[in-house]
Amino acid sequence: MKLPSVHRNHSGEADIQYLSATYIEGYVSDVDRFLPLSPADFQVLVLLSNRKLHGYGLVQASAEEFPAQSPLDLGTLYRIISRMLDDRLIREVKAPDDTPADRRTRRYYQATEAGRAVARAEAFRLRALLASPATLDLLATRR
Amino acid sequence: MNIGLLFIRGALRLYPAAWRRRFEDEIIDAWLDEREAAARGGRIVVWRSTGRTITGLLKAAVPVHLQHRAARRVHPELTSPRYPMRSVLIDLRYALRTLRKQPGFAAIAILTLALGIGANTAVFSVLNSVVLSPLPYADPHQLVRLYEARDDEPGMRNFLTVPDLVDVREEVRAFSSVGIGYTYEAIGGDLTSDDGATRRIRLMPVSADYFPTLRATPLLGRSFTREEEVPDLPRVILSHALWMNVAGGDSAVIGKAVRIDGVSMEVIGVMRPTFHDVVAGEIDAWTAQNTADGGYNNRDNHYVTAIARLAPGRSIAQAQAEVDALMRRLGEQHPNTNDKRRIRVLPLHEDVVGESTSAIYILVGAAGLVLLIACLNVANLFISRAVARSQETAVRTALGAARHRLVTLRLTESVLVAAMGGAIGSVLASLGVRALLSVSPDALARAEEVSFDGRLLLFGIALTLVTSVLFGGWPAWSASRVDPNTALRDGSRGNTGGRGERRGRSALVASQVTVAIVLLSGAGMLLRSFIERQRVDLGFTTDGLTTFQVNLPTARYADGPARVRLHDVYQDRLRALPGVQQVGAVSWLPGNGGHYQWGFRKVGAEGSAATQIRVIDGDYLAAFGIAIRQGRAFSDADRMDSDSVALISESLAKRLYADGSAVGSEFRTGGRQFTIAGVVADVAYQANGSRADMVYLSHDQFANNRNWALTYVVRSDLPAGTMIDQARQALGAIDRELVVHEPRTMNGVLARHRAREQFMTLLVGAFAAVALTLAAVGVYGVVSYSVTQRTHEIGVRLALGARPAQVRLMVLASGLAPAAIGLAAGLAGAVALGGVLGAVTFGISPRDPGVLASVTGALALVVLVAGWIPSGRATRVDPLQSMRR
C-alpha cells in the first residue's frame, strides 16, 4: 500500500493539522506512534531521507551535519538501523554506481516513504516547539 | 588478530544470533573504515574510537534483544529456515510435544531402542576394556609371552624349564629383559597375623626381572635382585591390597616381618595399587624365584611361565629367530631333554585376551543384530505413525513447507527417541554388565578391568545417531512424499497408506524374522554346545564330590613323614564321619587344566614323553571312580622306605608299552626311578574333555619331594555345606592353624571352566529372546494394522457372504507371508554364519540341523500366534458399521 504524499504540502502548522486531522486512521497514526524521535533516531532518519548511506557513511555525515550532537557510535547506530528496518522506516538499497569496489561489506540504506514522513513529522514537531512564543522568549534572554 | 577486533567480536556474541548474522560483517567493516579514518589522528584517537565502538556495542546489546523479541512477534518470517538453529529448537519442541501426546508409542519406541542400544553398549564396554584397551603397562606392544612347544606340536603352550629360560635371558639379544614367574595357582601361602589367625593368600615367586619387564616399580621399597634368586629366600613383596590389610598402609612396614607358612619373611617392597598382574591374576604377595641350577631346576621340570620385553626396535620375528637358534643349540647340547624342543614368542596382549576375542566378536555381532531388529521395529512404528499423520503432512506441504523441513522435522523426532533410548540403554548396559560379570566372573580375561569410559560414551552417542537415521530416515523420507491432494481428499476416511508403504512394512517384518532366526539359531547352537559340554565324558564321576585344599606350613611340617602322618590322621577322621564314603587327595584336580608336567623316560630307552604328574593319597581313584585296568592301585604297603611305585594312564601304557608289558616296567621322572604297579583308566585333564598322559605317584612315598598342597576329594551323601563344616571342624581339632581352603563341589570346579560358554549362552540367549519378542511384536503390528486398514473391505466381503474363517486367513496372510520369506532367508543366513560359531561351539556342528529345525519351529509358532490374535478382530467386523464409516 502506498503512503500518502504529505511532503507536497510545505507550510508547517497547517501540515501538522492536516496530518492529524485527515489521516486519523491508518498510516498517520503509525507516524504518530514513532514520535517523538530520539535525537539519534532523528539524525539517522533525516540523513537517510535525502541520500543513500552505509554505516560508516552515516557516522561521517552525522558528524558533519550535526556537529553539536555527540557522535554516533556503531552499536547505537546499528541498533537503530535494525529497528528501523524492522519498522520499515528505512530499507536496504543497491549501492550507488560510483562506490569504490573493495572487499568490505557496505550495505546502503535509504528512508522509505514512511520513514520520510516520520522524519518530517518530527521536524515539524520540533519546529512548532521552537516557534512557540515562550521558547522564543527563552532564547532571546541572555542568561 | 587485532585486539580491538577481538573485543568487538566478543561484544557481538552478546547479540541475538540471527541479528549477529545479519549485521556482524557490516559492523566490523564499518569499524575498520572508522579506524582507518581515526588512524590519521594518531594511536590515541584510534583507541578512543575503538573504545567508543565497544562500549556502544555493549550498551546496545540489551535493547537489541528486546527489540528482536518484539519484532519476532510482529514478523514471524524471522523464524523461517534462514535461521537454522531456531528451526531445530522449534522442531525439538514440536517433537517433544507430539511424543508426549502419544505416550504409548513413545514408550514402546524408546524401550525397544533402549534394549538395542543397551545390549550394544554393554558388549562394546567389554570389547573396549578387554580387547581394544592396551595392557596396563608402559610400551605394551614390546611385551611378549614365552611358551614351550615341540617341533611335532608347534601349537603347544607348555610351561618352561628354568635352565632354558636362564639361557634365553643370557643369550637372546632381541629381549631387553626376561621375567620368570611360577604361576601355578597352588602356590599359595598361609599368612598368620599377629593374633594368630591364619588365612591363605596367593603367592607367586618371580625372578628379579619380572617387574622391570612389565616396567612396574614398587610404591615402597624395592623389588628382587638377581642375587636374591635363591631357594627359600625369606623376603617378600606385598601387593597394595595386602599391605593395606596387614599393615593398614603403614610405610614403616618395609624391613618388618610377616609370617607366611610359618616362616618369618622380611617385607622389602610394596607394589602400587595400579599394578595388575594380567598373567597371573590377582596376587597377594611375591617371593623370589630360585633360578639356580639343580633341584627343581632341571631341563625336565616344566613349571614356570615367562614374559619378556623386546629390545627397542626389535620385532617378534627377530626375537623368535634368535630363540630358535638358541633352542637348536640346546637341543644338540642336551639331546635327552631338549630334543625337538621349541620356545614360542607370542604378543602378550594376544595371549591374555586371545581366547576371549572370538567370543567377544560373536557377542558384538549378536548385539548388532539385536539393534538392527530394534531399529526395524521402531521404523515400523514410525511408518504407521507417519501414515496416520499424512493429513498433517499434507496440510504442511499445501501451505508450502519445504520437503527438507518435513524430513528434518521427522528426523528430529527420531533423534529424540533414539537419544532417550540411548540414555536408558546406557543405564541398562552398565547394570547389565555388572550383573553378567557377577554371574560369571571367570568368563572373560581382564573382566575386572571392564569399566565405562569416554570412548564408550562416544560410542553410545554415535550409535544413537546412526540408529536414529537407520529407523527414522526412511519413514521420514517416505512421509514427506505425501501428495497433499490425495491425502486431504482421502483424509476423512483415514488414510490407507500406499502400496509401496505396505510393501515396505512387509519387507520390515521379513527382515525382522530373518534377523530373529539368525540370532535364535546362534543361541540354540550355543545352548546345545553347552549341554554337550556338560555331557562330555571326563572319565570320572563328579556328583556327590566335595573338594577343598589343605596346605601344611613347611615350618611346622618340615619333613615328608610329618606331612604324611597329618594327612593319614585327617583322612581317617573324615572317613569316620557319618555319610562319608571315600576320602582321597590329589596334587591337582582332574578337569582343572594342566599342572606339573614332567618328562617320562623309560629305563633303557632314548627320549622322553611329556606327562602330567599327579600325586595322590587315600581313596582318590575310588572317589572319582577311576578304574584299574591292569595291576593294582597304591596300598598301605607302599611306604616311603619301600620301592617307589607309580600308576600310569591307559593311553600312556598303550603308546609306550604296546605289548602290554607296562606293569613291572621301570621309568624315571622327577629325578627318581619308579616301577609301574598298575594301569588306570584315562581321565580328562581339561574341562573340555581333553586327555593327557598321566602318571600317578603316591603321596605316602613322594611326600619328601616337596610340600604338596593337597586338594581333598570327599564322596558323601551330605550336602556340600554340611560336609565342609564337618571337614573344617575335624581339621581344626587336629591343628588349630590349618585352613580348609577354597571349598567347592567338584561340579563347581568344572563350572568355572565352563563359565565362558555359560556367559555366552546366557547373553546370546537373552539377545535371542529380545529378537523373538520384537519379531512377534512386528508380525502382530502388521496383521493388526492390516485389519484396521481393511475394515471397510472386510465389511464388504462379509456382506457379500465371505465366511469369517476366510477373512481371517486373508488378513493372517498379510503378516505370515513376509514372515515366511524372512524365515527362509534367516535359515540361509544362519547356515552361512554358522562357521563363525565354530570357534566357540563344542561337540556339535555349528549348522546342526536339529537346532535349526527346532528354532524354525519355535519361531513359526510364535509368529503364528502373534498373527492369530489380531486377525480375530477381522472376524468380528460388523459389515454395516464398517461400510457406514
Image (tube, coloured by chain):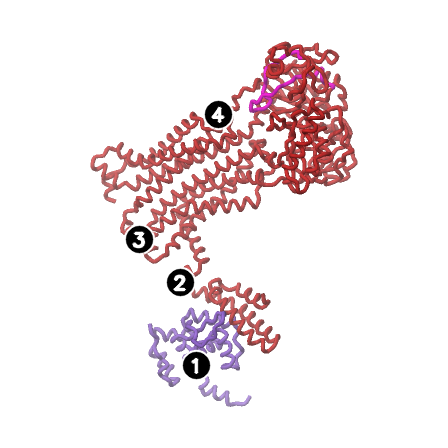
Chain colours: A purple, B red
Q: Residues within 10 Å of mark 2 (few under 14, many from 20)?
A: few
Question: Is B262 situated above or below B377?
Answer: above
> Both on one chain, marks 2 and 3?
yes
At numbered mark 2, what does the secondary structure look like: helix, strand or loop?
A: helix
Disc 3 target residue: B484
Q: Nearer the viewer, residue B287 or B643?
A: B643
Q: Chain of mark 4?
A: B
Disc 4 target residue: B844
Look at the numbered discs 1 and 4 and tell me whether their residues touch, using CB distance below 8 Å: no
Q: Which residues are magenta?
A: B676-704
Q: Nearer the viewer, residue B66 or B352?
A: B352
Real-space CA distance between mark 3 and mark 1, rounded to the nearest whole angstrom? 54 Å
Disc 2 target residue: B77
Quadrant where the C terminus of chain B is found in the figure? top left
The disc, 4 or 3, on the residue closer to the chain's N-terminal end is: 3
Identify the residue at horizontal 30%, vertical 45% (top origin). Answer: B496
Real-space CA distance between mark 2 and mark 3, rounded to the nearest whole angstrom? 23 Å
Q: Amino acid at mark 1?
A: Ala
The answer to whether residue B472 is magenta is: no
The answer to whether residue B702 is magenta is: yes
At numbered mark 3, what does the secondary structure look like: helix, strand or loop?
A: helix
Q: Is residue B579 visible?
A: no
